[in-house]
Every structure is written in C-alpha cells, then in structure tokens.
Amino acid sequence: MEYEKVFQPEQPTFYVQVADESSLADLYLQLTSDYPQAAIRIVRGNKSKTLPDFFNEIGAALQFPYYFGENWDAFDECITDLSWIDGEAYLLMVNQANLLLQDATQNDFQILMQVLSDAHETWLTQPQIVNEAEQPTAFHVLFSCTDEHRSALTKRLTDSGVEFQVFDK
C-alpha cells in the first residue's frame, strides 16, 4: 500500500494528497483500521486560517495539555512530546490544507513547517519503547486539498523550502 510509508520513520516529513473532505475522511477511516497502532489526527485547514485559530485547532486535535500556551515555543514543546497519546507512529492529516494559515503571515507558515520538520527529526532521534525495544518513531504530515488547489499548495510548500511527496490519486 502506498500509504505505508507515512507510518515508517523515514523522510520526507510532508506528503500531499489530492482529495476532497469526504475522500479524506474515507482515507482516515481506512488508515485507522489498517494501522491501529498509529495515532492519526485530522486538523481542519478551514478552521486554521489564522494563527490563534490554528493553535486552537491543533490543541483540540491533539488534545494538548491544559498548560499549552498557544505560541510557537509551546507548540514545539507539545508536538515533540505527545506522551498523552498512545501511538507507535503519528500522522497529522490536514484537510483543506490550502487554507492552513491563509490569513496569517508567510513567516508563520514557514515557522510551522520548520517546527513540524524539527518534530519529525526529534521523533526519529529520540526513540520510544515499543514492544520492549527502543525504536525511532514515525511522525508525518499529510496535506490534503482538491485538485484545483494542488498547484497553489505545492508551490507554497516549495516556497517554504520543505521536501514533500505527492501521492497519486
């Protein structure tokens, strides 16, 4: 299966999938069934257009602790911990990703990409105990958008300097 790689501790951090909300919901159900050991969460891009809205949405999606400060340092701290979520791998699925931080600054989007990239590296280099053995942990982000927004999303990711892979339909 093509999606197996998002549950492996390897590069890249980011993936792009062309899908509408319904198709992404179907994929979410399929992946949670096929990979029950993974923690898979959906972040709604349409609810994350501004920076405060993003922090609210990601905090809810990942059930960040009550002390989450809704700033970049607090986000970095929480995204590299996740000890309150059981999972041998972590996958964030962002629907309507073309709307993610749409009303924030480009700098905020670049900071987000950097924090998520750094989190990916942290999870690779700070192994967790799984089945009584230490192993690196997969942490990936799957951005989803409709075909009409694909080129704008991939350009935005490219402009941010991150590597990503596009899944075929």
Image: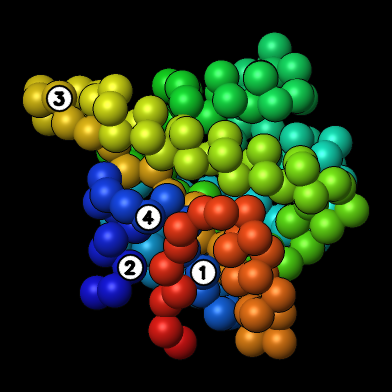
Looking at the image, which residue is at 76% across and 41% down? 108
Q: CA distance from mark 2 to mark 3?
A: 24 Å
Answer whether residue 29 is visible to the viewer in this image: no
Q: Residues within 10 Å of mark 2 (few under 14, many from 20)?
A: few
Answer whether residue 44 is visible to the viewer in this image: yes
Looking at the image, which residue is at 72% across and 67% down? 98
| Mark closer to the chain start, 2 or 4 | 2
- The residue under label 2 is 3
Q: Secondary structure at mark 3?
A: strand
> Would you say 119 lies left or right of 46 here?
left
The label nearer to you, 1 versus 2, is 1
Q: Please state the horizontal and vertical placement of residue 132, each as a whole percent of the image.
A: 10, 23
- The residue under label 1 is 16
- The residue under label 4 is 12
Give the colouring mode of the picture: rainbow
Q: Please state the horizontal and vertical placement of residue 6, each as a whole percent of the image.
A: 34, 57
| Mark closer to the chain start, 2 or 3 | 2
- The residue under label 3 is 134
Q: Is residue 158 above or below residue 62?
A: below
The label nearer to you, 4 versus 1, is 4
> Would you say 107 lies left or right of 25 here?
right
- The kind of residue on which mark 4 rests is Pro
- The kind of residue on which mark 2 rests is Tyr
Q: Secondary structure at mark 1?
A: strand
The label nearer to you, 2 versus 4, is 4
